[in-house]
Amino acid sequence: MSRQKKALLAGLCAAVAALLIGGLLFGWDSGALLIAGGCGLGAYLGGQWGNQKAKETDAYREEWLGKRKNAAQPNQPEE
């Protein structure tokens, strides 16, 4: 099973567990609100984490391209 499918399955199991526990403790309407809030929070946190990783990747790429560009240029003799 791929990593994405495992994460999706774990998220669904956690959502069902939260709905059952929330429904039993606070009533079924409140349990549904907890699930909706969790879905929104998960998307927000996932976006923040993804943006952070993208910034790190972009910085690494720029550094790597700069090194490659400098290595490709022949050394100019000083006169």
Image: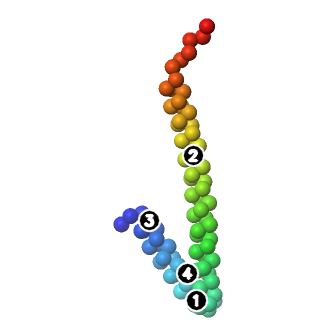
**Residue 25 appears anywhere in the view:** no
Tell me which amino acid carries mark 3.
Gln
Residue 65: x and y in percent read 53, 36
**Split into 4 quadrants, where in the image is the C terminus?**
top right
Disc 3 or disc 4, which is closer to the eye?
A: 3
Q: Secondary structure at mark 2?
A: helix
Q: CA distance from mark 2 to mark 3?
A: 23 Å
Q: Secondary structure at mark 1?
A: helix
Disc 3 or disc 1, which is closer to the eye?
A: 3
Q: Which residue matches tag 4?
A: 18
Residue 6: x and y in percent read 42, 68
Q: How is the image coloured?
A: rainbow
User: Which residue: 57% across, 64% down?
Assistant: 46
Tell me how many marks there are: 4
Q: CA distance from mark 2 to mark 4?
A: 37 Å
Disc 2 or disc 3, which is closer to the eye?
A: 2
Q: Secondary structure at mark 3?
A: helix
Q: Which residue matches tag 3?
A: 4
Q: Which residue matches tag 2?
A: 58
Tell me which amino acid carries mark 1.
Gly
Q: Is residue 62 above or below residue 68?
A: below
Q: Earlier in the sequence, mark 3 or mark 1?
A: 3
Q: Secondary structure at mark 4?
A: helix
Residue 67: x and y in percent read 53, 31
Residue 31 quadrant: bottom right
